[in-house]
Image: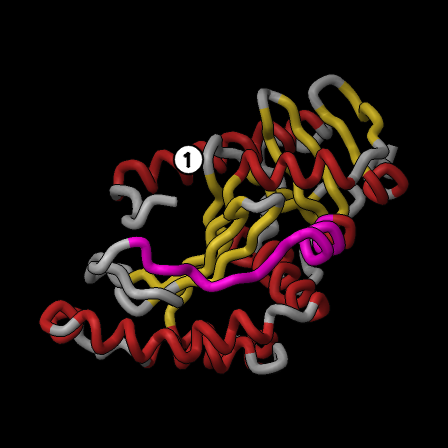
Amino acid sequence: MAKHGMSSNKARSVRQKGHDDALEFALLIGLKHDYKNIPTAKKDVVDPAGDTHSIKSGKKKWQLFLYGISRFKNDDVFKTMNGIGQLLVKCIEAFPEKFEDYIKDKNTAKEKCRIPMRALSELLQEKDRISAFINKAMFNSGEVNYLTIKHEKEFHIFWNEDVIKVFAESVEVKNSQARSKNQVSEQKVIFKYDGKNLAELEMRNDTPKHYRQICFNMIKPRMMSLLFSKILTKKKYKDNIYVYGKAKNKFGKWK
């Protein structure tokens, strides 16, 4: 994954593409242009049954969250997630409050960050904790019912429990390792699938705008490979919409 974040123009373009894809899906399932959504809670589309969808598209990766310290301190789920939220706070607190102070001495902060990052990786060796974390990151702890992915002009719908289960069962959790003398190990928690990086939890410290924030990114093609290989049952709902696993018994019941 790229070390630095995207430009403001690129970020706006990505957000607009997300809105356009959500609207396309909403219209395909019979909603109108003024369909309901609550994007702050990851609820991009509320379908006619009242169930909610997180719509993901993009070609390379998804940013599942980008949060500062107040989110981890104040969010009730992060605060009670078996110590995960507290360790994320410690990762952020390893860095000085002012970006200018960090620039003067990057290595001290990165060395301090290694301790909570290592502890996070150790906590996430337990599958139940991986499940709780990915449930929060992707589905706002069960408030969102479906992961709906636009892929090659088609929409693929997965039930939240299926996604959480296959992710937790399939990934291996490790810390990043330095590849050069200018890098510092244990600056990320990496979720690996089939020997390759599937998702990364890391500090953002490259620009003042996103300084002391934690980003969780996922590689789209590898996540699609995981879902397609582990959730095998599939049915066609209508042109360009396919439903998988437990979603087959739930989606479209308003018809």
61 versus 255 height, above or below: below
**Residue 45, percent from left and from top:** 63, 43
Quadrant occupied by the N terminus: top left
Residue 70 quadrant: bottom left
Nearer the observer, 63 or 168: 168
Nearer the observer, 68 or 116: 116
- Residue at the image position 74 percent from the left and 17 percent from the top: 239
Residue at the extreme top: 239
Quadrant occupied by the C terminus: top right
- Residue at the image position 64 percent from the left and 35 percent from the top: 225
154 vs 13, left or right, is right
Is there any visible trace of residue 145 in the rendered image? no
Provide the secondary structure element on which disc 1 rests.
helix
**Residue 237, percent from left and from top:** 81, 26
Q: Residues within 10 Å of mark 1 (few under 14, many from 20)?
A: few
Residue 202 quadrant: bottom left
**Residue 112, percent from left and from top:** 31, 79
215 versus 221 height, above or below: below
- The question of residue 169 being in magenta is answered with yes
Residue identified by numbered label 1: 16
**Residue 21, percent from left and from top:** 54, 31
What kind of colouring is applied to the model shown? Answer: secondary structure
- The question of residue 241 being in magenta is answered with no
97 vs 218, left or right, is left
Q: Amino acid at mark 1?
A: Gln
81 vs 73, left or right, is right
78 vs 182, left or right, is right
Magenta segment range?
163-179
Nearer the observer, 168 or 136: 168
Is there any visible trace of residue 114 in the rendered image? yes
- Residue at the image position 33 percent from the left and 59 percent from the top: 178
